[in-house]
Image (cartoon, rainbow, N blue to C red):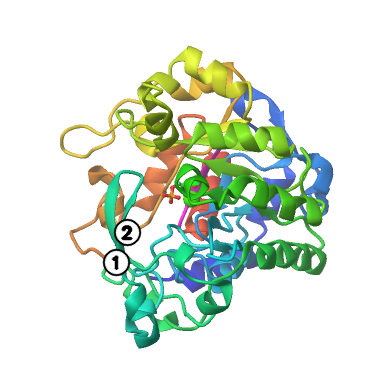
Amino acid sequence: MGTQESYEQQDRGTGRRALLGAAVLGAGGAVLGLAGTAGAADARPASGGLKSLPVPTIIGHRGASGYRPEHTFGSYQLALDMGADIVEAGDLVPTKDGHLVCRHEPEIGGTTDVASRPEFAGRRTTKMLDGVSTTGWFTEDFTLAELKTLRAIERIPANRPHSTLYNGRWEIPTFEEVLKWQDEQTRKRGKQVWIYPELKHPTYFRELGLGLEERVAKLLRKYGKDRRNAPVILQSFEPTSVQRLNKLIDNPLVVLLSGANTRPWDFVVTGDPRTVADLIKPQGLREIAGYAQGIGPTLDLVIPKDASGNLGTPTTLVADAHKVGLVLHPYTMRNENPFLPANFRKGTDADAYGDAFGAFKAYFATGIDGVFTDNPDTGLLAREDFVNG
Ligand code: G3P
Ligand code: CA
């Protein structure tokens, strides 16, 4: 696929440096962040805050999960080495003994080797997770010491057979390890490393006595990263979780938005009848802007697809969000055919790349401020093309 090749070419070339060194136009044409000198990108201060990021910001989704098993230090490190502006390290869930670990969901049957461990066979169970019956192994039933004996595996081997090479190589990271890694990498590179952790299923875990927000805040405080200008953006699909974070810490906060007809689980539990369609109306966005700095909508809320799965006409969401001062970091761009809009696919192979550059370009053209992508190297090149016209 030329992945490694394109990464190395990008690193060797001068285009990216020139791009980052130039002032970048963001929401409403405002100049965001960098000083406009070639060296500015390498000396970006930690105190620059959210607006110091290049736009559109390339966020390594679960690391560089297009190439390595997600939420491993192998994946995080590759995202950083490729030049991602931010690494989504990690999606956070708790262990039985209250530690925060990096997994996309509490059920770990699809992303670790737990199913092949006879000593944990008895932990397999069925639970209701946000109203959905879910069977497997759950982080909250394991101590950290037990989880550390597991090894990560590729979630979607049919689409990413190359990534299975790394099955069994890395353990599950803790959030505390991520915070230390961020500092080590920042020191090593002489350049601020940003992370973008997400709190997963906060209402579900609070009901189990494992509240996430206080645990996240405590660790951020311990490492001096609980400030507005700290290089840590926090995100959640549950607005009340973001509101809770807003009372505990000063970090930039982002409300994630799923499909228009869905309801955040905290709304279901508290009886709030609003759906995402309500939250993206001007009143809903104004309310979000009262406690958060951004939204992370699914890409379909920015450009819906037609009945054939082709990209349709952009909505007004970008303009509406910018009007109330919110940045937009939609999710998730992936290079493989099945994850691209139909009109950007090439052939039908599930593990083949389609015209990902074309898709990035279409989304960038809407004025989004950044994007989560499993393929940060592709996203960075696409940004270079976009900014250079
Ligand atoms: O965090 C942005 C995006 O990651 C939300 O989707 O399901 O991949 O966590 P998900
Ligand atoms: Ca996430």
Front-lying residue, 254 or 367: 254
- Magenta segment, principal secondary structure? strand
Residue 190 higher or lower than 23, as above or below: below
The tag on residue 159 is 1
- State the extent of the magenta-drawn residues as a range: 370-374
Q: Where, quadrant-wise, is the N terminus in this rendering?
A: bottom left
Q: Position of residue 312 (x, y in %)?
A: 28, 29
Please tell me which residue is depicted at 62% across the width and 52% down the height of the picture. 86
**Taking the image as drawn, is residue 369 in sight?**
no
Amino acid type at image mark 2: Glu
Name the front one of labels 2 and 1.
1
Front-lying residue, 19 or 307: 307
Amino acid type at image mark 1: Asn
Mark 1 is surrounded, within 10 Å at the Cα level, by few (under 14), some (14 to 19) or many (20 or more) other residues, namely some
Sequence-earlier tag: 2 or 1: 1
Residue 187 higher or lower than 328, as above or below: below
Q: Position of residue 141 (x, y in %)?
A: 45, 67
Q: Which residue is mark 2?
A: 336
For residue 48, side relative to residue 203 (left or right): right
The extreme top residue here reads 283
Distance Cα–Cα, label 2 vs label 1:
7 Å
Residue 341 colored magenta? no
Toward which corner of the image does residue 98 lie, by quadrant? bottom right
Kindly indicate whether the residue at mark 1 contacts the one at mark 2 (C-beta within 8 angstroms). Answer: yes
Secondary element at image label 1 = loop
Q: Position of residue 194 (x, y in %)?
A: 69, 53
Secondary element at image label 2 = loop
